[in-house]
Image (tube, helix red, strand yellow):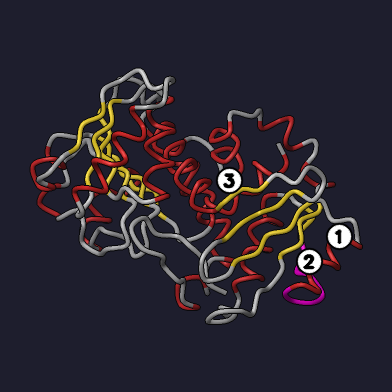
Amino acid sequence: MGLSQGAVKLTRLKTSDICNISSGLKAYNEQLLTGTGRTLLGIACHAWGVEEIKIQNQIDSFAIHVVPITTGQGIISDFSQTVTDILKFMGFKASISDNPDISGVAGSFESKADAIMMADDQRFVGINLNNQFVVDNSEATGRVFAAALDLMAKGIENGKVLVLGCGPVGEAAARTLLSLNAKVGLYDIDLPTANFLKEKLSRDSNIKTDIVVETKIDMAISNYEYVLEATPSADTIPDKLISAPMCVAAPGVPLGISKKGCKILKDRLIHDKLELGVAAMAISLLS
């Protein structure tokens, strides 16, 4: 099963990317708690501005079916099970549909599921079957990683944040950060893409802060304390540019930071390939 997880180009996850997610959920939840003060559920709630206690009172009765899709390059082994495990870990009433594709969608309606999640080579979406609301993984992922960065910073207002990668994930992250009154810089290897996003964001009447387009990545990284790394490229942030106070939220696949860089950042780095995005999708469907 393919899905959009990158910023500039579509990234198809491999089985090796997700094979350890289910068994590592408890440890990752503790890592998030250490880095942000909130759990997987808590960060997802923060992303959408909903109270965690209210979600906890509804979550176990909200049924989500994960529907395998066989079109395109086909099913990624363990993808549906991993998404289901993430949802169950959060407390949702989640299961894999009995059948894939159209039969799975129809079966979810017939069994009165509240929502479905499914992905092909182009999009990974969640659909609330009660009100027809659709959430895209790219939107949810950008939003939730921006929320995680806000929690790491203990409030990102007036903080300088560099968004690396100006595709769908980067756009959603930038929009969220601007709504939190952060000072946002944009960088993309394709300069017209960054300029286009700046113009698009600047047209939003709710945006009150200036947006800067950076053209030299090394110089840009050195001038920002907070970085949201949303590119599909490795080694985007060189080790030598990682400063002591830097905090990084990185939804990009592959991770744009070396193993050494990860050790330098320690708890000041939040990165995963699926967990936070799925969590944010689920909370948006419920809330």
Pick whichever of labels 2 and 3 is earlier in the sequence: 2
Q: Nearer the viewer, residue 112 or 242?
A: 112
Cβ–Cβ below 8 Å for labels 1 and 2? Answer: yes
Query: For mark 2, what is the residue?
Result: 105
Amino acid type at image mark 1: Phe
Q: Position of residue 51 (x, y in %)?
A: 66, 28
Is 98 part of what is drawn in magenta?
yes
Magenta stretch, residue numbers: 95-101
Badge 2 marks a residue whose secondary structure is helix
Give the secondary structure at mark 3: helix
Q: Position of residue 284 (x, y in %)?
A: 65, 41
Contact check, label 3 and label 1, Cβ < 8 Å:
no
Which residue is denoted by mark 3 in the rendering? Answer: 280
Q: Which residue is mark 1?
A: 109
Give the number of the mark in front: 2 or 3.
Answer: 2
In terms of sequence position, does the residue under pointer 3 or pointer 1 come before the other? 1
